[in-house]
Image (spheres, helix red, strand yellow):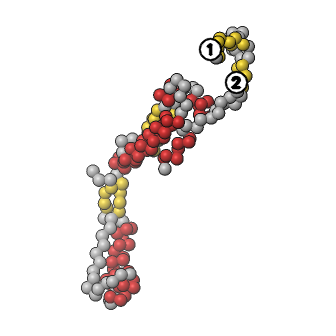
Amino acid sequence: MPLFGLINDSPILYFGQRIARRARRLNSPRQFRSAFGGSGRAGTRISLSFAKIVFRRPVLDKFLNSPSGPVGRYLYGRGLRVLLAARSQVGVKTGKLKASLEIEHSRRGPGQQVRVGSPLNYALVHHEGARPHIIVPRRAETLRFSARGRIVYTRVVRHPGTRPNKYLTDNLYLIR
């Protein structure tokens, strides 16, 4: 089924017929050339036929808004570029954040969207960084953790913060 249909009564047809009548009224080749530009001959005839374009909504909707349509495939390809670049840039300690990066392609309202990210709760902290802060125990009296191979007990930890690793926004230039 074609993307659009043709109807014979439209403003495009009206103006096309008007141009054709004007061309027929011109008597000499010189008038024809001056009116339309180009090299016309005395026996030149112009025949124009235009029609009104009516878009078939279901076909157009699938073309523009379906993830399987050409626009959807294009968007998914751009999102995949960002995803692969983000996976190569993200910090790897255990590999869990890198493995959790995913792409989600969905239809939203009259359009569609591609989302690249991670469902992990610390992904935003890794991306945006953290300011220096104090960590205190919530349920127990002391904190317990290992540092340099030794187990440490303390009531307060002054965390120095982390620098941001903008693994997603640094790679948005790949969308162009």
Q: Is residue 66 visible?
A: no
Q: Is residue 84 left or right of residue 15?
A: right
Mark 2 element type: strand
Q: Is residue 163 left or right of residue 85?
A: right
Where residue 138 appears, as percent x and y from the top left, is 69, 14
Q: Is residue 8 visible?
A: yes
Indicate the quadrant where residue 33 lies. bottom left
Q: Which residue is mark 1?
A: 149
> Compared with residue 48, is residue 39 higher up or lower down, i.e. above or below?
below
Instruction: Give the label on residue 10, or none.
Output: none
Where residue 37 appears, as percent x and y from the top left, is 38, 81
Dot 1, how many residues are within 10 Å of its Cα: few (below 14), some (14-19), or many (20+)?
A: few
Dot 2, how many residues are within 10 Å of its Cα: few (below 14), some (14-19), or many (20+)?
A: few
Mark 1 element type: loop
> Compared with residue 19, is residue 110 higher up or lower down, i.e. above or below?
above
Q: Residue at x 34, y 69 (%)?
A: 13
Three-letter residue code for mark 2? His
User: Who is closer to the viewer here, 35 or 116?
Assistant: 116
> Compared with residue 101, is residue 144 higher up or lower down, i.e. above or below?
above
Indicate the quadrant where residue 162 lies. top right
Where residue 123 appears, as percent x and y from the top left, is 56, 29
Q: Which residue is mark 2?
A: 159
Q: Residue at x 51, y 34 (%)?
A: 117
Q: Residue at x 36, y 76 (%)?
A: 18
Q: Residue at x 50, y 29 (%)?
A: 98
User: Who is closer to the viewer here, 101 or 76?
Assistant: 101
C-alpha separation, residue under disc 1 versus residue under disc 2: 19 Å
> Compared with residue 54, is residue 163 higher up or lower down, i.e. above or below?
above
Q: Determine contact: label 1, label 2, CB under 8 Å.
A: no
